[in-house]
Image (cartoon, grey):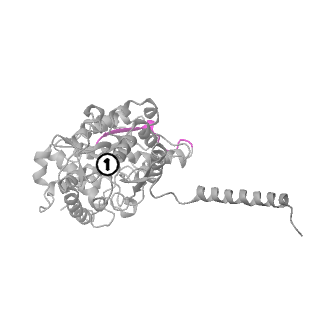
Amino acid sequence: MKTKSHDLILPGLLLLFLALQVTAWAQAFKEPDANCCRTLRVVLYPFLPAHGDYFFQVQHDFEAANPRVKLQILDLSANYYDPKKADYVGASVADVYELDSILLADFISQNRIQPLPQKIPIRSQDYLKNAQSAATWGTVWYGVPHWVCGYFLFFRSDDPNADKLRNVKDLAGLEKIVGANHQVGEGVLVDMMGKLSLGEMYLAAAFDRYSDWDHVRPHLQPDQNPEEEIESDLWRLSRLSDANFGRSSRYHYADGFYGRQFAHGHGRLLVGYSEGLSPLLDEEKNACQSNECMNSAMIDVAALPLDDHALHPISWVDLLTIDKNCTGDKLNDAIAFIDFINREDEMLKALMPDNNTSRSARYLLPAKASLYANTNLLNAAPLYPKLRGIIEDSFPPVGTNMNATLRIYGATVDSFLSATNKSPRP
């Protein structure tokens, strides 16, 4: 039996429609063309509160604004500083490196990074004074300042000795306030573990003792042993913490432990970086009942003294630098990324509380000066003006082999503290 022509038309059209639909679906879900986009590899400084959320936010926002660029962020949070590990920042390969200023001179001497291109407009007055100093080698700018950090002394604004704490100038004064025989829970909350952390504390104490880089440098040589007087400074600080508290590997690796303890009043003073306030505020926001915990309005801050001679705080700066082999479109992408991540609106996203995730203000210190006058930020984190007043006048030491040297000193100090904390100071 013959089939009429119109009996074939409708099934044929249906098959054609289905074929076109399948093709459309395949086009929609196929792997993107390898030639459609450029990849930009970036190392971001990882030791930030909720750094994974921050990395995701940066990638999402940058790719949305730059659809022809795929951003690959290398997470080096496991071993950013450790030269013995594969994911050490010095062994990484990227187009943009966010470098702790402790590493800047090494990257320059090894010809790893290039001076900032003229396409990056950089004005000294846009940044904190210590950030400007750390970002230059001689008169050449090698990095765009992003974050700054250093040690602070935090205390309750209603502490009976609050006025003395605000003006404490030496370690002996701090010892007098806390007391050698303080009660449990009334000591200093301070993490004194980790080779690099102890090395940095040693350097900070050396600056308090010798006042400036020219006088400190001869006392910081990798072939010399740490000085007994400066080791003694760190031993004295460790003795102000409660027994088995500051010298605990367990607490050292528990993110935000000391800040959370301070939130509950389990310590009179807190020593640490400004971002150490973030877990304190998270605790108050998410884990406390009623008025059990402190809030940011109840906290005050001062510089941390680590010797008896004088107070000369130091600081570190995280710098956005560009790989020496970055040219052409890749260089333009790197410049676009640095401009993007250092924009005030993007930095505010990183700093402000996030109600969607119940995260409090991160309390990172921006290198960009204008943010310290941002009303929204100050309402969320009122300590910023005081923190700036301390950190901006600090000195950012930059020199070759500093990371390695401080790790050597820190390891020796660690052994010294382990021995002396088991018995009276020899």
For the C terminus, the quadrant is bottom left
How many numbered badges does the structure rendering display?
A: 1
Q: Bin the neighbour count of mark 1 within 10 Å (Cα to Cα): few under 14, some 14-19, many 20 and up.
A: few
Q: Residue furthest front?
A: 2
Q: Nearer the viewer, residue 320 or 228?
A: 320
Q: Amino acid at mark 1?
A: Gly
User: Above or below — where is 58 with respect to 302?
Assistant: below
Location of mark 1 (residue): 328
Q: Residue furthest right?
A: 1
Percent x, y for residue 50? Answer: 45, 51
Q: Horizontally, is 55 left or right of 116 in the view? A: right
Percent x, y for residue 77? Answer: 38, 58
- What residue sits 26% from the left and 42% below the top? 117
Q: Horizontally, is 193 left or right of 308 in the view? A: right
Give the magenta range: 290-303
Q: Residue furthest bottom?
A: 1
Q: Residue 227 sits in which quadrant?
A: bottom left
Does residue 183 belong to the magenta stretch? no
Q: Nearer the viewer, residue 350 or 175?
A: 350
Q: Residue 158 sits in which quadrant?
A: top left
- What residue sits 39% from the left and 38% below the top? 343
- What residue sits 14% from the left and 46% below the top? 213
User: Above or below — where is 48 with respect to 130?
Assistant: below
* Residue 196 visible (yes or no): yes
For the N terminus, the quadrant is bottom right
* Residue 313 visible (yes or no): no
Helix, strand or loop at disc 1? Answer: helix
Percent x, y for residue 115? Answer: 23, 45
